[in-house]
Amino acid sequence: MLNFISFCAKKTNNFSFQKNYNKILCFFTILTLCLLNTNLKANNLAIGTPTVVGANLAFTIQWDNSWNASLTPSNWDGVWVFVKRQACSDNLWTHALVSTVSGNHSITGAILQVDAVTDGMGVFIRRSAVGNGNITVETVTLALQTAANGVDNFQVFGMEVVNVPQGDFYIGDNGATGSGASNWGFKSVLITNAIQTAGIGTAGNYKSNGGWGSTAALPAAFPLGWNSFYCMKYEISQEQYTSFLNSLTYTQQLVRTVNPASAVGTIAFASAATPSRNLIKIKTSGVAAITPAVYGCDLNNNGTYNETDDGQNIACNWLSWADLIAYLDWAALRPMTEFEYEKVCRGASPAALTGEYAWSAVSLLQAESGALTNAGQAGEVSTASGNGLCAYGINNTAKGPLRCGFAAGAATNKIQAGGSWFGAMEMSGNIMEQCLGGYNFNYSAFTSACGDGSLTAAGAANTAEWPATGGGQGGGVGRGGDWFTITTQRLTISDVGYMTDNANQSRDRRFGGRGVR
């Protein structure tokens, strides 16, 4: 499952050419495929080589197992597409705004539509009518707000998403304490339009323990989850995060990784002693304050990068809260709230089931990285199969998370694939989901504002009112459990046992995440 593919208007995928050489390359608009896998189990997103067509940008798109379901409320999958642009004047990658009018974009065929967004940060591509099946190759033409030319470089990025429709849903699992003996969890509350419109009170109104949440009432602008939104179908993959790192300046990389000038083969941000299946490394060393490093995946540890078994599609662990929100800001997404996490998992279920996992059942079967077929490849799967297949409880730092969507196939149902009500994968297990929430903190100023596609010069997220620091007492809280932790209660939808765990203030092998918009 390749859920993030980038293509660049350069002869290679090396983003660290010296400036004078880069200027020469800018005059050649040969567009090269950076990576494409086709022997995949899940949804096989493939975005073709972008080309400049007049003032616009055109590329092909295809993916498998697409759906638009006639449920009440309806639900569909799609792709969030955005563009980065590198001007020859400064060689910096910046976010390319596109038209905010859907009709200014086009797509061939009669199945898909292009939905513009009001801030112009990208588009959503999805089925226009009820149906399911594979999306064959179609051509998308995006209207850029600043006309394309034959000099600048372009990268087109895409990630699979699921639509979470507006509507009522339950937070809390109906347990006497919200999430078992810890007494840390949501009360059982039906979130309605009336609650979203009026807002909700302090933590005492919605948490089993009144201290485990916002110290101020959450207003109507706070994303309580009733309104519709899109959620990434998969956790951020190692390939996705590598592509992000490769678009940053040297100074920005210096905050997100080890020193970019470190030797080739240096592990970028995981523990060098026990990387737990995250072997994103420095492929080409940077030059201090001048040339950024180039990063690549090397799971097989042979010094050759981005081979078929180098783990590009493994969920990216070792992400701190600051790392996660920097990525989301860059991708023009935002962190999900705890309320939204529960809605993505539980959906429109008429009532919560005590102790349920993200697939709305209590079935649980362990999958782990020591028992895999096609380990590290795009088709990596567990040798185990059955209801509630989940990466959890391994408690061995020599192992790690699995491929994004590892349990999903064309013939698996929701419980077998570990899919949530609305089709998001691994919301329980694999890596910890970092959500906006925490202990005794004021979250009332947080809104549904998404990232602006850019970071500070120092490589940090710059969107207003996003907590800059992780940990239960000032930023993202861990939800859904992970591949390492033994306690199965942590996998349940309503557990907030990491409410006061500050592990994600720094990098931790259990933590990753995804974004919403």
Image: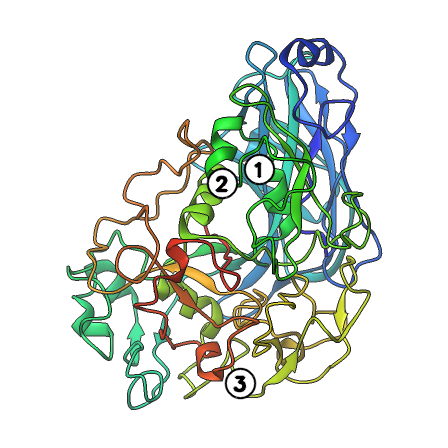
> Is residue 121 among what the camera can see?
no
Q: 343 or 19, which lies in front? A: 19
Q: Are marks 1 and 2 in contact (CB under 8 Å)?
A: yes
Q: Residues within 10 Å of mark 1 (few under 14, many from 20)?
A: many
2 or 3: mark nearer the eye: 2
**Number of marks present in the image shown:** 3
Dividing the picture into quarters, in which one does residue 409 lie? bottom right
Which callout, 1 or 2, points at the residue further toward the start of the chain? 1
Residue at coordinates 19% horizontally, 63% vertically from top-left?
440
SS at badge 1: helix
Amino acid identity at mark 2: Arg
As displayed, is residue 226 above or below residue 490? above
Decide if residue 245 is on the left or right side of residue 208.
right
| Residue 459 pos. (x, y %) | 44, 34
Q: How far is mark 2 from mark 3, CA to CA?
A: 38 Å
For the N terminus, the quadrant is bottom right
Dividing the picture into quarters, in which one does residue 199 lie? bottom left
> Is residue 352 among what the camera can see?
yes
Q: Are marks 3 and 1 in contact (CB under 8 Å)?
A: no
| Residue 127 pos. (x, y %) | 64, 52
Residue ID for mark 3: 361
Q: How far is mark 3 from mark 1, CA to CA?
A: 38 Å
SS at badge 2: helix
3 or 1: mark nearer the eye: 1
Residue ID for mark 1: 245
Q: Residues within 10 Å of mark 2 (few under 14, many from 20)?
A: many
- Most extreme residue toward the right is 39
Q: How far is mark 1 from mark 2, CA to CA?
A: 8 Å
Q: Which mark is residue 256?
A: 2
1 or 2: mark nearer the eye: 2
